[in-house]
Image: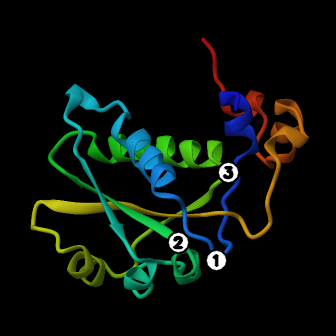
Amino acid sequence: MDTLLAIASRREVRDYKPRALPRDVEERILDAGRLAGSSKNRQPWRFHVVPGELLVDAVYEPTNVRGAPFVVAIVVSGKGPVSFDAGRAAQNMLLAAWNEGVGASPNGISDELAARAVLELDDEERIAIVLSFGYPAKPRDPESHSVDEWSARAKRRPLQDIVRRR
């Protein structure tokens, strides 16, 4: 898939088919996260693959993880721009998933203590984000529209409202 088409056509997917992802698809998604750039190449992340049911009581939107066949918590440690680096890894994973026809949704942590217990984290580790993945219950064909058409449908502010040039 064309990168711009993937970016323009990807939307959050929260309802999944009850179908497991093949292991090779899971590995490609995880590898896309691993390949993300990071400040000074620190690679401050760890990817915890857990059954979504274990995190239902610890995330802001339990339904996002409840039916997801593949759930990844991105955990970071260290100093510097580790949250930004985790975001880069997460975006790589989201786009790689979409390239495979897999939908996804990010989810924040509402109960830090419960999530830490599930993930068995040490004191220096913190949860950056939880990503749920699965085949969309309502499939969407990225090729059904052009990049410009997807962009127009994205309900985003126009570039001229957010870009300042000097």
Cβ–Cβ under 8 Å for marks 1 and 2: yes
Mark nearer the N terminus (2 vs 3): 2
x and y percentages locating residue 46 in the rendered image: 25, 53
Circle 3 residue:
101
Q: Distance of mark 3 from mark 1, alpha carbons?
A: 15 Å
In which quadrant will I find the N terminus?
Answer: top right
Q: Nearer the viewer, residue 125 or 66?
A: 66
Label 3, residues with CA under 10 Å away: few <14, some 14-19, many ≥20: some
Q: Report which residue position mark 2 lands on.
A: 69
Residue 41 placement, left or right of 132: left
Q: Quadrant of residue 160?
A: top right
Disc 1 from disc 2: Cα separation: 7 Å
Position of 91 relative to 114 (above/below): above
Furthest-bottom residue in view? Answer: 57
Which residue shows up at 65% across the image and 29% down it? Answer: 3
Looking at the picture, which amino acid does disc 2 mark? Pro
Q: Position of residue 48 (x, y in %)?
A: 30, 63
Question: In the image, is residue 148 above or below residue 128?
Answer: above
Identify the residue shown where x is 46% and y is 54%.
26
**Residue in the foreground of this view, choosing between 60 and 102:** 102
Quarter-wise, where is residue 4 in the image? top right
Q: Which residue is mark 1?
A: 18
